[in-house]
Image (tube, rainbow, N blue to C red):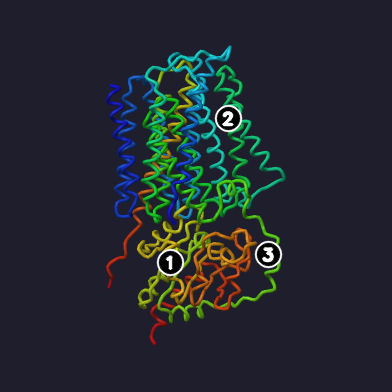
């Protein structure tokens, strides 16, 4: 079975369209009376983040399509560990000085959850992969 | 300093892509794990040197990392039959992390300067929180079902789909309202509650046989919530790594859906696996049953044997006995192959991992599409704990709920041996014509015990003729 790219492609287009729509919404929001006047975060460039997302999705789809069927379970535990990259956001929230330590606490719980995934994800992936062996040379 | 951070993130992104690229073959896959670990270390190091982090908070971060590791290490020791539960549980952790960071970001934007919300960031934040929390409860439910703490049968009630879609629509409406005007802060907790509720409601009607698809979809959501976090924080590493996970989950879901000939919508809202009304008529048909000794004699005379494992093999923990049987058969010069259906088991690739654990060389694990053309030449097909994936009704019976699903054509083999606990229909509650065919012999009993008996009959002592 060859995975067709049609649906992922459609999904990517939908997501990109969603991004464009939110940008449009932002412009409209400015016109709504009483809406918060949004101050732009310095260095924030939405279009380039959307580009990064689109390209990363295409790379991801192409790379993952080539993953051996044998390894789909380890693939999932590996991508699980990779998506625990949320640890980066968690550390930033937990590490900055906030007016209320409860913000840090949320970040710290998020670090615990992410690190759990990183540690168990990589360890179990390696444990599973170690088991995949070719046919041994005929033993006596 | 910020340049170094960006360079670290760039290196980490490249390493993550390489990690997945190396997963394309079992020979390079472990290198892929190493690349992933290196990427994560570079990413965490690059984050820790960020000058925005207060010195006083490092000790807390260190503590959180230690606690996470203490929980994570034992979680990686689970028996391989429990890998689907562990995977679902870690999707829950991933969703929780994204959700909590989102909550923190939202309220911080009101109390601190420099992190104001605009429409783009608010929309991304809503997506992050929505996906994060629905993945959290949804994955906990999935893990509960896989661990059989929560009933594995689909739980349904009238108007369920309307209720579910209503909850989701309300949450999305909340997101839209907040995006248009971020002052509607009271909507935010509502979105969280709705997302948590939707996660539970979404998984409740889903049966065990659909778990491979559901786990893949949740995998994708966990990744996409990290992407949304990246949009909120303007962090490109979060976006790339999250997108890699998201696309992986997406591809696996598509493969699983195709292997069942069903659509996403049908898996999520179809409540597959309810007992079919027509199972009653099965009682009148007769089956031929055989003892393990009879079955062993048949296998002895075969030149080629194809073993089809299913979830039943995992439940009975029979993979090591299967390995013994494999050894005895190959020692007699019989060609043994394993036919792996993409949705056999409870998560993608589940059977491969169990058989690899039992030291069966992966070169003898054959995908459905590659084994099917060979089936007519196969002397004996041995079905161990599989049911729907070998049901010929999928090819022939238009009224069957599994009609159109690709199956392993065991019915084309010269003789079929089926190891089954009883004549109860399988998880999906669909009767299987295969069991009543002339060439089929049923061997009743626990998969582990029966395969063990088969292996014993075929072991050296009986091989003196």
Write down the residue under mark 1: B371
Q: Residues within 10 Å of mark 3 (few under 14, many from 20)?
A: some
Q: Is residue B254 above or below residue A45?
A: below
Image quadrant assignment for residue B47: top left
Mark 2 or 3, closer to the camera:
3
Write down the residue under mark 2: B192
Q: Residues within 10 Å of mark 2 (few under 14, many from 20)?
A: many
Q: Nearer the viewer, residue B224 or B142?
A: B224
Q: Distance of mark 2 from mark 3, alpha carbons?
A: 42 Å
Which percent across, then down, holds residue A80? 42, 42
- Of all chains, the one bearing label 2 is B
Write down the residue under mark 3: B279
Q: Secondary structure at mark 1?
A: helix
Q: Distance of mark 3 from mark 1, alpha carbons?
A: 30 Å
Q: Secondary structure at mark 3?
A: helix
Quarter holding the C terminus of chain B?
bottom left
Quarter holding the N terminus of chain B?
top left
């Amino acid at each position: 079975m060859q995975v067709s790219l049609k649906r992922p492609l459609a999904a990517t287009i939908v997501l990109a369209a969603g991004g464009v729509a939110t940008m449009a919404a932002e412009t409209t929001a400015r016109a709504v009376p009483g809406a918060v006047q949004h101050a732009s975060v310095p260095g924030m460039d939405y279009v380039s983040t959307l580009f990064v997302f689109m390209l990363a999705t295409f790379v991801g789809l192409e790379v993952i399509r080539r993953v051996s069927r044998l390894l789909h379970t380890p693939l999932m535990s590996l991508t699980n560990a990779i998506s625990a990259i949320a640890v980066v956001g968690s550390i930033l929230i937990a590490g900055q000085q906030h007016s209320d330590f409860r913000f840090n606490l949320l970040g710290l719980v998020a670090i615990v959850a992410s690190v759990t995934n990183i540690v168990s994800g990589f360890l179990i992936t390696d444990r599973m992969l170690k088991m995949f062996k070719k046919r041994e040379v005929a033993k006596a | 300093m910020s340049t170094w951070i960006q360079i670290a993130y760039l290196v980490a992104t490249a390493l993550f892509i390489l990690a997945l690229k190396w997963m394309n073959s079992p020979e390079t896959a472990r290198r892929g794990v190493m690349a992933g670990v290196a990427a994560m270390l570079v990413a965490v190091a690059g984050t820790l040197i960020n000058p925005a982090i207060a010195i006083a908070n490092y000790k807390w971060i260190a503590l959180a990392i230690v606690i996470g590791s203490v929980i994570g290490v034992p979680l990686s020791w689970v028996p391989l039959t429990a890998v689907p539960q562990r995977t679902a549980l870690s999707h829950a952790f991933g969703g929780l992390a994204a959700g909590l960071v989102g909550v923190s970001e939202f309220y911080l934007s009101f109390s601190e300067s420099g992190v104001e919300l605009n429409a783009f960031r608010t929309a991304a934040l809503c997506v992050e929180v929505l996906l994060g929390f629905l993945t959290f409860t949804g994955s906990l439910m999935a893990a509960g079902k896989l661990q059989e703490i929560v009933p594995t049968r689909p739980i349904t009630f009238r108007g369920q789909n309307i209720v579910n879609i209503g909850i989701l629509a309300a949450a999305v409406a909340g997101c839209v309202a907040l995006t248009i005007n971020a002052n509607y802060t009271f909507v935010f907790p509502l979105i969280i509650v709705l997302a948590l509720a939707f996660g539970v409601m979404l998984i409740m009607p889903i049966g065990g046989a659909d778990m491979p698809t559901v786990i893949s979809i949740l995998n994708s959501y966990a990744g996409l919530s990290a992407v949304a976090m990246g949009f909120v924080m303007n962090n490109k590493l979060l976006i790339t790594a999250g997108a890699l996970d998201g696309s992986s989950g997406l591809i696996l879901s598509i493969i699983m859906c195709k292997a069942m000939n069903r659509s996403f919508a049908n898996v999520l809202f179809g409540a597959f696996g309810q007992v079919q009304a027509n199972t009653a008529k099965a009682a009148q048909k007769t089956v031929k049953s055989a003892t393990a000794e009879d079955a062993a004699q048949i296998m002895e005379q075969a030149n080629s044997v194809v073993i089809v494992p299913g979830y039943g093999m995992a439940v009975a923990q029979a993979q090591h006995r299967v390995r013994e049987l494999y050894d005895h058969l190959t020692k007699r010069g019989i060609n043994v192959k394993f036919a792996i259906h993409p949705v056999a088991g409870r998560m993608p690739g589940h059977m491969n991992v169990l058989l690899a654990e039992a030291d069966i060389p992966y070169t003898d694990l054959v995908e459905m599409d590659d084994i099917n053309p060979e089936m007519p030449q196969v002397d004996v097909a041995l079905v161990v704990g599989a049911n729907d994936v070998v049901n010929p009704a999928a090819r022939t019976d238009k009224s069957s709920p599994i009609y159109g699903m690709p199956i392993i054509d065991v019915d084309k083999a010269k003789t079929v041996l089926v190891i089954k606990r009883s004549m109860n229909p399988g998880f999906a509650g669909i009767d299987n014509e295969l069991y009543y065919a002339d060439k089929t012999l049923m061997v009743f009993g626990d998969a582990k015990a029966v395969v063990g008996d088969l292996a014993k009959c075929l072991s050296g002592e009986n091989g003196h003729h």
